[in-house]
Image (tube, rainbow, N blue to C red):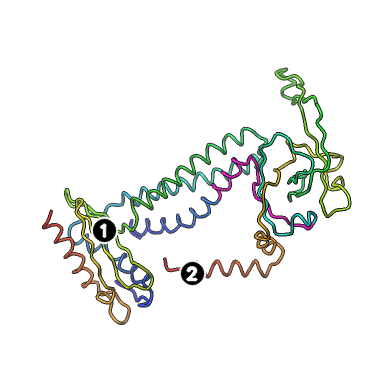
Amino acid sequence: MSKQVNLNSVVQLRNECDEHLSPVFTKLGYKETFTLTDLKLTVGYLSVLAAGLLFQLDKKYKNDFNNKEYVFYTTIVVAIGAGFHLAFLFVNTFVSKNVKFQGIKGKKKLNVSTVTKSKTDPSYLVTVELNGKKVDEVVPFNTVFNSNGYLEYAELETKLQSIVKKLEKKA
Amino acid sequence: MNVRQIRSQLSQGLTMAMVLSSAYIFWKLLSIVTNSGSPLVVVLSGSMEPAFQRGDILFLWNRDQYVDTGDIVVYNIQDRSIPIVHRVVREHIVYEVERPTKEERKKGTKKGKTVKKQLLLTKGDNNEVNDLSLYAYGQKYLDRDRDIVGSVKGYLPKIGYVTILVTENQYFKYAMLGWLVLSVLLTNE
């Protein structure tokens, strides 16, 4: 069920479309996988855990930098925490940037990334990647939203499924 | 709530937690590099005017073995939570016999060892007298190793005034909080 969104907000339009990607591709038989999301969550929360541990050390040793034991433990935890943080940034920036759906159907692997060019350009840029073959498609928001601000789900579904079907034929 | 929604909620929580944790890890990293428990401090009083004004942010470094006379240092006093920024006006190098702790004495594992110590006397540039009255009861000098948080190596004028406003002006504090809450509520990303 779609909700009413502000048609003047490109961010809201994009978010509403992103939320409906999963049923579109699931209908085509692609089972959604959360490997990247889980990786991001694990690395991210490990980094937060390291910060929590640093806070505990700070409380236990009263932030006394004359205490060699405190400095030793703090250095180790900072190195671990910074490592996790950098790994999180790497995954976020290079691996899963704008990826909104990942699914598998047999040996087929589907990756869908979406983005909007700017806050003033109401175009939904969709990149669909199927087993390494990529297609970029521009979907203007006025073709998938009605004038009342509700998503025309059937329209979005037709447009996105046609891209995947084209790719499946090529593959 | 399905698995997708749980992950979405966790991701949203992570975004906020990452902002706080990364700032904290960076702060601790800075502490390790400078060997100081507080590598940045805000000047809270006018006792070092005209060198530093209220609200200036100071960058500290605590890796030099000794502090020179004339250096501006930040130090802590026992049982006082606020660090003080003043200039070193006198220094002494003394040799002291380090007393072993009770346990060490019982075990006989450690005997008194002679250590070289630097003792410092400080004064605010804008103050008439030195800091003896500020030190803890019975304390005549600062111990370079125990009391000094770091010596000042650089500063940014006035930027830390926000901290003073938040701590001293409750209206400003509530305005800041309100602005933060509003910005979170009105952000669509």
Element at label 2: helix
* Residue occupying the point 38% across, 53% down: A93
Q: Locate residue A34 relative to residue A68 in the image: left or right.
A: left
Q: Which mark is residue A112?
A: 1
Three-letter code for the amino acid on which mark 1 is drawn: Val
Segment colored magenta: B24-46
* Residue occupying the point 49% across, 48% down: A48
Q: Residue furthest top?
A: B108
Is B38 magenta? The answer is yes
Mark 2 crowd level (few <14, some 14–19, many ≥20, 10 Å Cα): few
Above or below residue A139? Residue A97 is above
Is B76 magenta? The answer is no
Chain letter for mark 2: B
- Total marks shown come to 2
Three-letter code for the amino acid on which mark 2 is drawn: Leu
Element at label 1: strand
- Residue A3 position, x and y percent, is 33, 74
Frontmost residue, A135 versus A113: A135
Cα distance between the residues tagged 2 and 1: 29 Å
* Residue occupying the point 32% across, 78% down: A149
Frontmost residue, B109 versus A72: A72
Q: Which residue is mark 2?
A: B185
